Image (spheres, grey):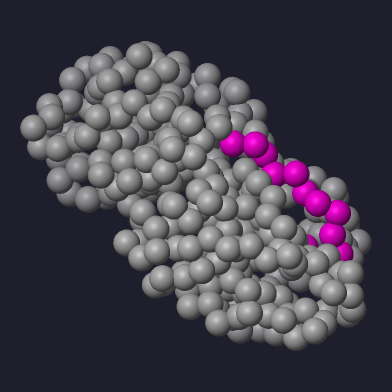
Amino acid sequence: MTVRYRDGIEIELSDGTRIVCDADDPDGDVTVVSHAHGDHLPDGETTAVCSALTAALGTARRDEALHRTTDDRVELLPAGHVAGSRAAVVTDPDGTRYCYTGDICTRSRFYLSGFEAPDVDVLITEATYGEPEYQFPDHDDIVDQILDWLADTDAPVVLFGYALGRAQKLQLLAEQAGRTVYTTDAVQRVNEPIAEHLGVEFPAANFDESVELDVGDALVLPMTTARIGWIEDLAEEADAKTAGFSGWAVDSAYRFRGNFDTAFPLSDHGDFAELCALVETADPDRIYTQHGSGDAFAEHLTSEGYDATTIKQNQTSLSEF
Ligand SMILES: [Zn+2]
């Protein structure tokens, strides 16, 4: 049997069944979608093994239906990354168990339960922050720092985070700090299914040109808009302070690259220590790493005695089973 990374990750079982995870144009026997971030969603109308919330978010974000189905060979586990995200545990008829993580975070925070690694034979894991320098502070300490900054900043604030993930947490934190919260349609479209499925209330009003940002206000914007001219102008006109939120903020260069007044390492991924701990728990015979520090993490795992390689697109890797 084989694990390949072509269009998404493909797991071929001993009976020839092809399970295809997070592909743009899935062509397998079973399609899996781990979560509703753009680089994991299929193009066009698709039926996939995914959570009900991922189906709702995928449909809301793309204007093309993502239908949910189930398959006896695929079990979904909460991945702790963003609302609705799941890791897939695939069981081969010969008993071999695979885990495809998608993006993961093992820290429980806000309305998300951290990923708990299953015991598997083959682990295909993301390794976005798979190098020792990526060490995130304790989650509660980051939250305290953000709340202190929101309370101490005597100006409107513009907070940048991914539309699905950080943007929801930033709305909750800004509200907790007593600010009036505004956000855009793109974020509201994501808020609605999450509110419906998880029962979390998001406090934001819609932001448009009629809104003048005041000292006690917080505007939550998608990270992709951080370098758009009119938003930079708007922040300047309102004399607002800007903040970026990402795991990359452990590196001080992040704040300067993003031209933010400040930055916080609030992440929806696991850091290096979390990735190491999850490998230890899963205790697999074979590990494939992908994304970010995939090479470095596979090298680290190999030095620890694991059978680990990074899986690159269009390289085929025959497993030893
Ligand atoms: Zn993601």
Q: Name the magenta segment's main secondary structure.
A: loop
40 relative to 302 in the view: left or right: left
Residue at (47, 70) in percent of width and height: 46
Q: How many marks?
A: 0
Task: Find out whether residue 257 is within the magenta segment.
Answer: no
Residue in view at x 69 percent, y 59 percent: 88
Kindly identify the residue that appears in the image at 68 percent across and 55 percent down.
Answer: 76
- Range of residues picked out in magenta: 112-124
Can residue 141 be seen here? The reply is yes
Percent x, y for residue 119? 86, 54
Res 126 visible = no
Please state the horizontal and vertical placement of residue 213, each as a whole percent of the image: 17, 25
Residue 262 in percent (x, y) is at 39, 32
Figure quadrant of the N terminus = bottom right
- The image quadrant where one finds the C terminus is bottom right
- Front position in the image: 120 or 221: 120
Confirm whether the magenta stretch covers residue 114.
yes
In this rendering, position of residue 9 left or right of residue 187: right
Location of residue 144 with respect to 35 vertically, above or below: above
Left or right: where does residue 128 sit relative to residue 90?
Answer: left
Q: Position of residue 159 (x, y in %)?
A: 34, 34
- Is residue 96 positioned above or below 305 on the image? below
In this orientation, which residue lies closer to the viewer: 75 or 147? 75
Q: Residue at x 50, y 21 (%)?
A: 145
